[in-house]
Image (cartoon, rainbow, N blue to C red):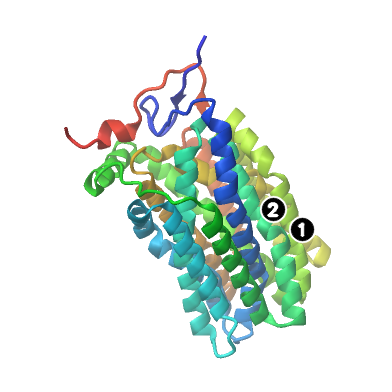
Amino acid sequence: MSTSFRLLGPFDRPGAGFRRHSPKETPTLRNKVAIVVYLPTLLLAFGQGMLVTTIPLFAADFGVTSTLIALAVSAAALGTLFMDIPAGAFLQRIGLRRAMLVGSGTVAISTCLIAFPFVNYEMTTALRVVAGIGTALWGISRHAYIAESIPVRERGKALSTFGGLQRLGTLGGPAVGGILIEVLGARTSFLASGLMAAIAFGVAVALIPETASLRTLSTRHRWLTVRRTVVDNRRDLAAAAAAQTFAMMIRAGRMLLVPLYGYTYLGLSGGQVGAILTVASIFDVAMSIPAGLTMDRLGRKASMVPSFAIMGVGVALIPLAHSFWTLMAASALVGFGNGFGAGSMMTLGADLAPRGATGEFLGLWRVIGDIGQVAGPLVVGVLADTLDITGSAYALSAIGFSAALIIVFLVRETRLRPEEPVGEPVAESVGRAPG
């Protein structure tokens, strides 16, 4: 007796966004994803992890305000935000391989340039924006590769593994960055991070096969597909977009809140802050696989809601920390919560993406998330200047709880159920060219 599926949730039609894969295809696809996406992702994530500790301290050394420190931290996310939609359309023309190579190469060059002694605060911020542009190309191409390659019923595990590897890369990165700051100076940390991106570029050159462009439909019909999908499901997508924005705000904001609180209020060194962030990353990584299994077996919301609620609690505890150890404990709780939502927003975006216009839709989806990535640190920095760091923490905590509540009450479940039939994918039904 065969088993059939229907996609539940924001696409209220049977099979929306669902792509059929035979059981024989799946192991091969998983192996290809592991080689093509996971290894370069691990390398890039380790390099970016070094900068989690480095950028706030490096910017503070220029004698700027907390708001400008937050701007330096947010600069890469700002560049990614600007490039998300163009990148989504761009990869349709040049193919996934070239998009990944251009993206990782741009990150490598722009990050290494900050290591030169003549680079000031303004140049550092500008180069981080350029790195964010490269990150957009890399990020959308790898996200699209997974969305196109992995069946929906296994997508949660695939994307949580992807998110877990990003976290694994940042596991040792903050500690290494902190050590490099203390021993060789902050600019060395930028050089080391850029070299990791360069190695990822080399791995991508060697391992990623040449791919054709993804132009299954004309540009007009791909955007028509996206438009029709958004219009037909506007209430559900609006709720999902709000949840995505708030979720990314607390995720990005805590990466400034912890170093800023440690440096400014507790007087911790770069190495100590790096150690705290590394311990938080251990909890983060440890929860990645359970997060994927939970999403695929119990539903996407079963992972997302506890994740953001726990993060809200952990962030609220940060202003109560009075020592290295208590700040580590609060950060570890935040890391635990973040890990339990590993890959959740990417999975939700991949679930919602209409077939035939994956790149364009994911470009829009990443814009929504990157608005949160930019806003989170800025909220922390601005409130730290106008009020104090305590006000920043409680505001960020409220944002986390808001994300959880929106997901509970307004975002529909997008997990597959085995008893319901597969229909025609939305992209094929609304975006097919006439004739």
Q: Amino acid at mark 2?
A: Gly
**Dot 1: few (<14), some (14–19), or many (≥20) neighbours within 10 Å?**
some
Q: Residue shown at 50%/16% (left/top)?
A: 3
Residue reaching furthest to the top: 1
Q: Residue shown at 78%/70% (left/top)?
A: 272
Image coordinates for residue 183, horizontal then vertical, percent: 77, 81
Compared to residue 59, the image places residue 255 above or below, namely: above
Image coordinates for residue 269, horizontal then vertical, percent: 77, 76
Residue reaching furthest to the left: 435
Query: Would residue 228 be found to the left or right of residue 27 on screen?
Result: left
Alpha-carbon span between mark 1 and mark 2: 8 Å
The residue labelled by disc 1 is 279
- Between 108 and 132, the one nearer to me in the picture: 108
The residue labelled by disc 2 is 335
Q: Amino acid at mark 1?
A: Val
- Rendered image quadrant of residue 385: bottom right
Q: Residue shown at 61%/71% (left/top)?
A: 195
- Between 255 and 32, the one nearer to me in the picture: 32
Q: Residue shown at 32%/35% (left/top)?
A: 427
